[in-house]
Image (tube, helix red, strand yellow):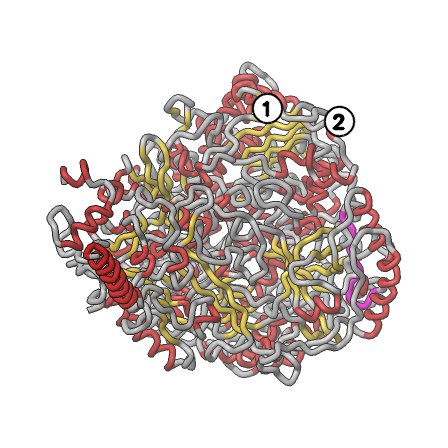
Amino acid sequence: MGLRETFLPWPVLRQARAVAGLPGAGRGDRSGRGDSARSRVTDRLQPRTSTADRVVASVCPYCAVGCGQLVYVKDERVVQIEGDPASPVSRGRLCPKGAATKQLVTNPRRQTRVRYRRPYGTDWEDLDLDTAMDMIADRVLATRDATWTDEDSQGRRVRRTMGFAALGGATLDNEENYLIKKLGTALGAVQIENQARI
Amino acid sequence: MVQGSNMAECHPVGFQWVMAAKARGATLIHVDPRLTRTGALADLHVPLRAGTDIALLGGLINYVLCNGLEFREYVVAYTNAATIIGEQFRDTEDLDGLFSGWQDDKAGYATDSWQYEGTSVASSAGKRERGTRARHDGQGRSHERQATGRGHEHGSHGAALSDLSNIRRDETLRHPRCVFQLLKRHYSRYTPEMVARVCGIPVDVFLQLARMVTDNSTRDRTTAWAYAVGWTQHTVGVQYIRAASVLQLLLGNIGRPGGGILALRGHASIQGSTDIPTLYDLLPGYLPMPHPDAHGSLDEYVADDSADTGYWGNMRAYTVSLLKAYWGEAATADNDYCFDYLPRITGDHSTYQTVKAQLDGSCKGYFLNGENPAVGSANAKAQRLGMANLDWLVVRDFALIESATWWRDGPEVESGELRPETVGTEVFFLPAAAHTEKDGSFTNTQRMLQWHHAAVDPPGDARSDLWFWFHLGRRIRAKLAGSTAERDRPILDLTWDYPTSGEHAEPSAEAVLREINGRAADGTCLSSYQQLTDDGATACGCWIYCGAYADGVNQAARRKPHTEQNWVAPEWGWAWPANRRLLYNRASADPEGRPWSERKAYVWWDEGKGRWTGHDVPDFQPTKRPDHRPPPGARREDALSGIDPFIMQADGKGWLYVPAGLSDGPVPTHYEPQESPVPNLLYGQQHNPARQTSRRTVDPYQPSGDEPGSGVFPYALTTYRLTEHHTAGGMSRWLPYLSELQPEMFCEVSPELAREAGLEHLGWATVVTAREAIEARVLVTDRMVPVRVHDRIVHQVGVPYHWGGNGLTTGDSANELTHLSLDPNVHIQETKALSCDVRPGRRPRGADRIALVEEYRRRAGITAETGTAPRTAASPGGTA
Amino acid sequence: MSDGLLEQPTGRQRMGFFTDTSICIGCKACEVACKEWNQVPDDGLSLLGMSYDNTGMLGADTWRHVAFIEQDRPLGRQNNSVTVMPTGPSGTASTAAVVAAGLGDKHGSMLGTQTGRVHPGPQPHATPDGHVSPGGRTELRWLMASDVCKHCTHAACLDVCPTGSLIRTEFGTVVVQEDICNGCGYCVPACPYGVIDRRERDGRVWKCTLCYDRMTDGQEPACAKACPTDSIQFGPLDELRERAARRVEQLHGVGMPEARLYGADPDDGVGGTGAFFLLLDEPEVYGFPPDPVVTTRDLPRMWRHAALAAAGVAATVLAAFVTGARR
């Protein structure tokens, strides 16, 4: 191997040796197109599913079939996502969307910074997340105060706000939906909806 | 049987099981207006006109009843076929398309006359009264017919019946007022010839279909029906599924392996977001949101909405446990467990009403959590104009979707209807964490919870929604600290103390699932909803999920390989309720508790052990004998006998006929879509009279049938998904690998329609409805066929709905074309069947686009009134 | 012995793909799974109008390609009802009148659409050689098939590669070594299937490796793993050929006599392929050459002739020198 790595990085010479039956080439490779032609990169090939630091069990985020996914992580980055053969739902298979999941979570077009558009603004602005959270909390409370209804026009006790609404949840986790409904209900917001209605 | 779904394209990996069954000899049938990738592999493809499935299913029901092909023993024992209906009931056969109880002034039904004979009408009078009163809810919009969504609540748990022993049954099924005879009469005109005239399905094809289905529905064989939003997105959507339920019950295909009606849902956890609802009318576990007219106190709420018999009889325990989960120590017997903290609903507050409230200015703030209504919701323009009228908008997503950027580059900016300088909406875009970056559970379409584990941290400012809502709540609570306002008590008393970890203080999703699962007084995790009590000793965030964290173990995270367990695979994830994989599976055994056949054995009575056993968790009281008959006056589940498999129904029977709980009739009936190129051939009543419509200029409707002007929109149009994209595109149009597979918005037309309309393959077409005009590239294909309906040929146009203006692949949105006429039970819009015009060339730009649509409206004579009359003028039914 | 004709007895079972197109649902999971695993670049957004195929063909940036073929013939005993559906213009006489009235407006309209309507009239639709029903409609079936590099037994690409970049692996597959390839492109015209292709951006050639890296660790190729319906099957070639033969027989028994294998015959022009297919029509329908022949088949003979000729020339020249020296 030493000889091969040092002196024969280019396969042609080894191929010639193989065809000529000289040492230093793949055994039995009379055509010179097999082992004797292997390059360093080829020799070192390892699938990144085998070299990952860890494999995390997951579920496909697209449709509701619930195909099992395995998420391969190397150096704290997702390097591959593919089907989980153990799943009784999917037996390791994925559709094109499921197969594109790595691109979904790693693609550079993903927006990873808060964007802010002020009223009547013509463009996006930067805003730090902490400030955004505080502003949103203020907006919720202000709108709630302005629109709070203890009794409706027929004098019925409703103790609610119709001043703000939420839409979305079908792509989220159960735990997330639980918190949205719980907080919304405590705030008196009833217009909490998701794609299930659509 | 795949109908109302395009399973191979929309659920390809689920479809592997269909292909596996096919390899073992199963027959696959696909009913769809288009020959799709599902139809390409089917043994029989049945083309039909979009929007006529009830006519087809009714035709199959009629075929079964006329030929005596029902599974008689199953039908008699397990359904309400034998139940006698009250004398006051009048069918659509008597009233030309209306049922008894129609009230013109309320534009809805009073349902008293639909009751079983012998049951106390008074017991549920309050419910109905409230339901109709709510349509005039005093919000100054009396012209917009409202409904509370009461049907939805009962759709999940049926209505209360006062006393089972008073129900009259005729098990010979001969009584003229028994449900069986009533069905026979109701569907008697749904003949193969009528199916052909309404749906456009040739008689021979219908008969082949009918034989395939009935031959395969026996003791030894079962037929499964898979559907999706091809059924739900109609003004009679609920009745589509009801029609399938009637047929499947008659054939004995419910509660048995290989049978059922399978909802193929489109989002990872859309089932979960219904169970633990982000829905206005529900609390977790299908408990109804309270209504002020009848739910002043917890006692009134429970008395009004729980069934006396069946498992809903324990509703008080479920409710008190939820209130304890929400408000913990603050919820006590003395304060009704904080029942008063719950806000009240007084009508339809669903998402489409929210859009109208935004347009009116009463709804000022909006959170979008992974949803893109500017593309994915019906009447996309109304969605955007609503958002343009907000004070603030928070969008949480992966990319700058159309719902985040409409103020700078939406269609209304192009047309000049909006300018950024005049739009006052403050917009926050917050990047969302992906499923690989957070812990949590999805509930997939088979009611199964599956846990996904965080693999890496989210990038940049991206955070989970768990993080967002937890910290938003934390900040709000901090800002309100010390408040003495009564209305702030629910927030300050809320249990909101989830442990957090890591740099971003991510709350523990497992802690939330533990709360959902529920705990006993000593803090230990509960294992079954049967442990829940109504005295405040137990807390449970969602009673049907009780057991998901049994023994302190995250059951949703179980991943025992399928190769190491039985074919039901009970040790993978966790299915509600009680890890049961097949609902109502008591019906898989005969009344004596024996399997209907060896081949179809699933759950059966083991006399030796004195209990139910089988491949799955029995969906029945485990030791209730098949020959058990309850004593008079028994309550809750104890009121059901050993042959009542449908334990969530008050009478334990599968309902062929729905005496209460639906707002548009007890038996499914064919009505034409809100917009249809043809008249209703079965009744004088054209549309579902109880459907919801509005009279807003932003949401006009087209004339239908033989009304003047209907010829301006001569073609049927249907919308759909493609394998290569996902819903409104937020998770696919930004990905190169998916975008390149379907790189452009298109429409599909038959060669005949192309010739007629002057369209060229790969050229441009402009598709026009009363709402908007969009452009699309043309695919001319033999897979699109016209149908012969009554006296005319109807051509169909197909449009996928994934596209919008942002991302890698862009195009006009199909939802520009759609409208906001809704199903009255669940308030879902009719986006699967409309009518349209199609013309060659690209659509006009700028103001000319608006002018084109206005020209169409003028030619069709469209006014605010068009298409909004509940009852068709010529119909005499209103005299009932 | 399936690998008996290979250049190198591998000592291992020859591995390959059997793509059963009769159960392909055209989902394109194979295309995406391949690109994700092999980090193949996307290759542009273009609506091709070839049914649902917007990929077009195999190439440097497409190692799996799903073809969609809409054909005017039936699929076995399938009844897709198409021939019994009507043809003709839409509507009734009265609606036609409304439409006709509208046409006047449109023609004179300034509102943008480019061409007017064609007069609606009954024109039965049929393709020239199609089966036409009494109603004027033809039969229809929608075929889908996932294509890939064939990993030929006699691989011309391998034969002509001057750098040793192309190799035969221990699994009997043909792989490009990207650290060796110098982009000479000799292999491109040599491939009888038009599979191997140069990537514009880096000049090198690229094609399916049958996920060689995954195979070295006992994992199946990404496309086969993802395939929801098992249309793409991976395994020892001998087993796959047996399975395929049984499948053909089964299809013949259910009214699909047109089912046939492509690339499974060791005696064909390329000695059989490592990736072979079950087709429901002639190969050309799917874009395959009907009778592929390894383009280097005649090379040895040509080399012999060339050598003889060269020897002759050399002898003549030598003779000339010898005789010249004598002079």
Q: Residue at x 41, y 28 (%)?
A: B507
Task: Say what secondary structure mark 1 lies in.
Answer: helix
- Region rendered in magenta: B699-707
Nearer to me, B849 or B808: B808
Task: Say what secondary structure mark 2 lies in.
Answer: helix
Nearer to me, B715 or B563: B715
Q: Residue at x 47, y 56 (%)?
A: B11
Location of residue A127 with respect to B875 vertically, above or below: above
Crowd band around label 2 with a 10 angstrom C-alpha radius: few (<14), some (14–19), many (20+): few
Give the percent coordinates (x, y) of residue B146: 71, 47
The residue where tag 1 is placed is A136
Overall secondary structure of the magenta section: loop
* Disc ID at residue B220: none
| Residue at the extreme bottom | C134
Any part of residue A6 in sight: yes
Give the percent coordinates (x, y) of residue B786: 67, 71
Any part of residue C274 in sight: no
Asked if the stretch drawn in magenta spans residue B636, the answer is no
| CA distance for labels 2 and 1 | 22 Å
The residue where tag 2 is placed is B421
Asked if badge 2 and badge 1 are on a common chain, one would say no
Location of residue A155 with respect to B841 vertically, above or below: above
To which chain does the residue with label 2 belong? B
- Which of discs 2 and 1 lies nearer the camera? The answer is 2
Which amino acid is tagged 1?
Ile
Nearer to me, B577 or A29: A29
| Residue at the extreme top | B482
Location of residue B813 with respect to B369 vertically, above or below: below
Nearer to me, B95 or B628: B95
